[in-house]
Image (cartoon, rainbow, N blue to C red):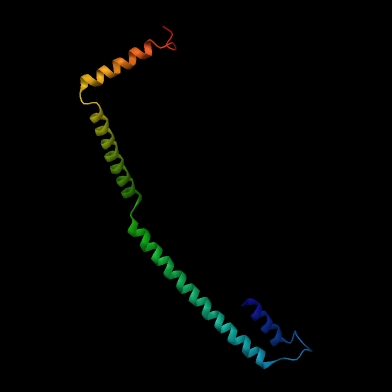
Amino acid sequence: MLKNLLKHLKDSTGLRGKGSRSDTGSESTKINFKAMSGDYAGHIESTQKEIRELREDMDARGTKEELAKTVETKFVQKMGEMISQLADKFAGKDLFTKKVFSLEKNVSHSPYSGN
């Protein structure tokens, strides 16, 4: 578009050819300028619309505080689930204690324990 405008500008000022001015070139330049002005206005309008939509979308998504609260809640829920699963694996306190003592005994008699 800019190339066409410059070409028409050169044509209308007599920079091309033998210095003769062309009224049709000047009219053509005015028409192209009006068309580009309309295009520019259209771009401004569409950009403003997109910015408005983006702001509305961001407002709808919530704040950082809401996000932090949601993440914290989900984290606490998952931790609770994991603890429940671990508790289910060791049905009673006695069984858990026996397993720990067994592991300690194996570690203390290990060749790497230094005893």
Q: Quadrant of residue 36?
A: bottom right
Q: Residue furthest bottom?
A: 23
State the quadrant of the C terminus: top left
96 horizontally vs 47: left or right: left
- Residue at the far right: name it: 18
Is residue 88 shown left or right of residue 11? left
Using the image, determine if residue 5 lies above or below residue 59. below
- At 35% from the left and 49% from the top, the residue drawn is 64
Image location (x, y in percent) of residue 92? 20, 23
Residue 47 sits above or below residue 78 on the image: below
Above or below, 69 against 61 in this view is above
- Residue sitting at x 62%, y 88%: 28
* Count of marks, rendered view: 0
User: Compared to 113, does 54 lie above or below?
Assistant: below
Which residue extends farthest top?
115
Tell which of 73 and 48 is nearer to you. 73
Residue at position x 28%, y 39% from top? 76
Left or right: residue 93 versus residue 37 is left
Q: Tell me the quarter of the image containing the N terminus.
A: bottom right
Q: Residue at x 33, y 49 (%)?
A: 67
Q: Residue 51: where, in percent of width, then height?
A: 43, 66
Residue in the foreground of this view, choosing between 75 and 90? 90
Q: Quadrant of residue 91?
A: top left
What percent of the width, then of the height, locates residue 10? 71, 83
Q: Pinpoint residue 112: horizontal percent, then vertical percent.
A: 44, 12
